[in-house]
Amino acid sequence: MPTKEIEITPDMVVAVWSGLQAKYGSRVIRKEDSALMVVVANALTSMGVLDRAAFLTRFTTTLLTDIYAPFVPGVPTPMHDLWSQLVIGVHEHVHVLQYQTDPAMFPIRYLGSKAERAAYEATAYGTRCEMEFWRYGEFVTPAREIATHILSYGCGDPEVEVLNSYLAAFQPTIRERYINEPTVVAVDLLDRMAA
Ligand SMILES: [Zn+2]
């Protein structure tokens, strides 16, 4: 059972997204308003990868430093409550940071190889464990359940296993400290607001 549960407010979500955007120079774009994302959605549908509506309404997509979100941070929707918006904000800024760390190779590696994509996503999904620990003092979502998310990104069972193993090994280290910078930025802001 969780040892605590911090209530998430719209102000918290806005503060974290604003703080992360300021730190990393990222932009948030409403996904359904983006002509580019509509083109991508149609392409994915015709390739049989993802349903157009699902791509536009369920998934957040980060290209370089632009984050295409199917919600406005701080405004909860049936599909994206405030907590999921907070978790997604930190996750997507890991991808922004991955791009900024290696601008030449990150897009090629991410798109070119399932194994590399799984490795980048492992770091990004690790922040979900960090954020859960911040909110609940515990890990409420099993590592394997988080790992299955990667099936939506063109990966298969072998990558789910890799991600599951990574997260299961990573979780105990979170009790000592948060290692992902976007998590640290978010938690610093949140703790200051809660104080
Ligand atoms: Zn991701």
Image (cartoon, rainbow, N blue to C red):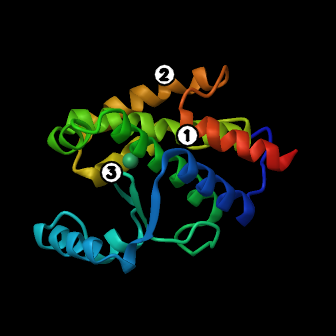
Q: CA distance from mark 3 to mark 2?
A: 29 Å
x and y percentages locating residue 48 in the rendered image:
15, 67
What SS does tag 2 mark? helix
Any mark on residue 169, and which? Answer: 2
Q: CA distance from mark 1 to mark 2?
A: 20 Å
What SS does tag 1 mark? helix
Viewer-nearest of discs 3 and 1:
3
Q: Which residue is mark 3?
A: 64
Compared with 74, 86 (above or below) is above
Between 143 and 101, the one lying in front of the other is 101
Q: Is mark 1 within 8 Å of ligand 1?
A: no
Q: Identify the residue shown where x is 66% and y is 59%.
A: 13
Q: Which of marks 1 and 3 precedes in the sequence?
A: 3
Lateral position of residue 47 relative to residue 75, left or right: left
Identified by mark 1, the residue type is: Pro
x and y percentages locating residue 188 in the rendered image:
72, 39
What SS does tag 3 mark? loop
Q: Which residue is mark 1?
A: 182
x and y percentages locating residue 115 in the rendered image:
22, 33
